Amino acid sequence: MEFLSKLLQGISFLPAVISGIEGLFGGRSGAQKKDAALSFVQAALSMSDAVTNRQIVDEEKFKQGLSKLIDGTVDCLNASVWRKTAQ
């Protein structure tokens, strides 16, 4: 159950992580920014420990899920006031 709590907490920080990545890597491609965000979230979730402890049984599917969450968060942010104030 601790991993689920950690996952939900990590998801709640996605907008802040993405905003920070945008500030740091604003001139880079979307794919590079997404890779940076994915790396940060994976590290924050201690994903390698979770795989070792068998809390994540399919690492590739988990990464795909995180990737979709990042894409969705970016879509929401780009459709919001956040996007307009950043321009």
Image (cartoon, rainbow, N blue to C red):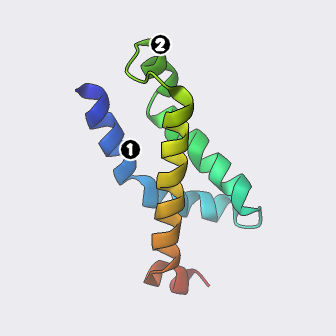
Residue under label 2, please give it.
52
The residue lying at 37 percent from left, 21 percent from top is: 55
Locate the C terminus by quadrant: bottom right
Quarter of the image where one finds residue 7: top left
41 or 51, which lies in front? 51
35 or 22, which lies in front? 35
Residue under label 1, please give it.
10
Residue type indicated by callout 1: Gly
Instruction: Say if 20 sits above or below 8 in the image.
Output: below
Farthest residue, direction top: 53
Residue 51 drawn at (x, y percent): 47, 19
Instruction: Say if 3 sits above or below 15 in the image.
Output: above
The residue lying at 48 percent from left, 72 percent from top is: 77
Residue 11 drawn at (x, y percent): 38, 49
Q: Earlier in the sequence, mark 1 or mark 2?
A: 1
Marks 1 and 2, Cα distance to the nearest angstrom? 19 Å
Residue 52 drawn at (x, y percent): 47, 13
Quarter of the image where one finds residue 50: top left
Farthest residue, direction left: 1
Instruction: Say if 29 sits above or below 61 in the image.
Output: below
Q: Secondary structure at mark 2?
A: helix
Q: Secondary structure at mark 1?
A: helix
Farthest residue, direction right: 28
Quarter of the image where one finds residue 40: top right
Residue type indicated by callout 2: Thr
Mark nearer the viewer, 1 or 2: 2
The residue lying at 22 percent from left, 26 percent from top is: 1
The residue lying at 76 percent from left, 67 percent from top is: 27
